[in-house]
Amino acid sequence: MIRIVTDSVASIPSDMANELGIEVVTLYLNRDGIEYADAETDIDAFYSDIYDMVDNIPTSSQPSLGALVELFERIAVSGDSLLGVFMSSRMSGTFDTALRAARSVAANHLDFEFRIVDSLSNSFDEAWSVVEASLARAAKCTLDQCADIAAHAASATRFLFAPESLTFLRAGGRIGNAAALIGNLVKLCPVITVHNGESSTFAKVRTHKKALSNITAKFKSDIAEYGLKNVVVHYIGSSDEAREWTHEVIEPLVGHSVKVLPVSPVIGLHVGPAVGIAYECNHSLPGKIDVDARSLIYAS
């Protein structure tokens, strides 16, 4: 059996993870000395006072090497193989820790097979790779085939989101390749995306409304040219604006209902209140990653 493991940053709801047979390893948050397991946190409740956190943003930590070794050891002992899909190695050490854990277990279990995939993203931009791997497993694909499908999905997805402001990104120091925006912080409502595993500026506009219009235009362009396979709308903070945008703009575009899901606080608290969209197309999207998708797979 192939066991599929991902991290809580993928933001997959627990009922969906259970239905698809996906095992989720949690990251952790620390707020005022209290530790929260990301995978077990009531995200809407956690975000309820998000504006009060900007001057004291909670810290986050990745799963420990020991915890991952323990999980992978159980998988090896059961005689199963492992397919791990984790958040971008350029955003967190979680991927590297998972790879170290898998190699450590493989050294003691010579018949243990694993494939670890670097999703080069986070949130549902990461989750689509996990979902595709689960569907491939259900279709009786081999471990290598499942890994190839997960890696290819990473090249066919896009994450576009519009923070209310850059205040949280600046305060948290997590703005990555969007750092050029800092010098123009006042009255700027950017559109942020993920390129080659790092946050990047997709567009610079002057109002939040224009940012959402920019996202909508890119979404329409992508699905017209490359087809649409999956889509969710994401939010950080309150869900009200995201639900309204979904109902009035996104659902009429795609012709069916669209899930509206919160982003993991591990990511969300470094972005601040925001609305975004994570979608998967039928074909690879130019400008998403600049490497061969197969290079994202690390094998036993």
Image (tube, rainbow, N blue to C red):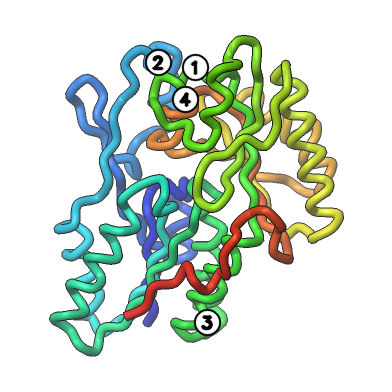
Percent across and percent down for residue 160 are: 64, 40
Q: Which residue is mark 3?
A: 145
Q: Which residue is mark 2?
A: 54
Mark positioned earlier in the residue sequence (3 or 4): 3
The mark found on residue 169 in the picture is 4
Q: Is residue 185 above or below residue 193?
A: above
Percent across and percent down for residue 104 are: 18, 72
Q: Is residue 89 above or below residue 105?
A: above
Using the rendered view, name the quadrant where residue 270 is placed: top left
Q: Which residue is mark 1?
A: 167
| For the residues bearing labels 2 and 4, Cβ distance under 8 angstroms | no
Residue kind at label 4, given as amino acid type = Leu
Element at label 2: loop
Comparing 43 with 52, the one in front is: 52
Comparing 48 with 208, the one in front is: 208
Element at label 1: helix
Q: CA distance from mark 3 to mark 2?
A: 43 Å
Q: CA distance from mark 3 to mark 4?
A: 38 Å
| For the residues bearing labels 1 and 2, Cβ distance under 8 angstroms | yes
Residue kind at label 3, given as amino acid type = Gln
Percent across and percent down for residue 285 are: 71, 58
| For the residues bearing labels 3 and 2, Cβ distance under 8 angstroms | no
Residue kind at label 1, given as amino acid type = Thr
Rendered residue at 40%/58% (across/down): 86
Rendered residue at 31%/25% (across/down): 58
Question: Horizontally, is 227 left or right of 109 in the view?
Answer: right
- Between marks 3 and 4 in the image, the one whose residue lies nearer the viewer: 4
Mark positioned earlier in the residue sequence (2 or 4): 2
| For the residues bearing labels 1 and 4, Cβ distance under 8 angstroms | yes
Q: CA distance from mark 1 to mark 4?
A: 6 Å
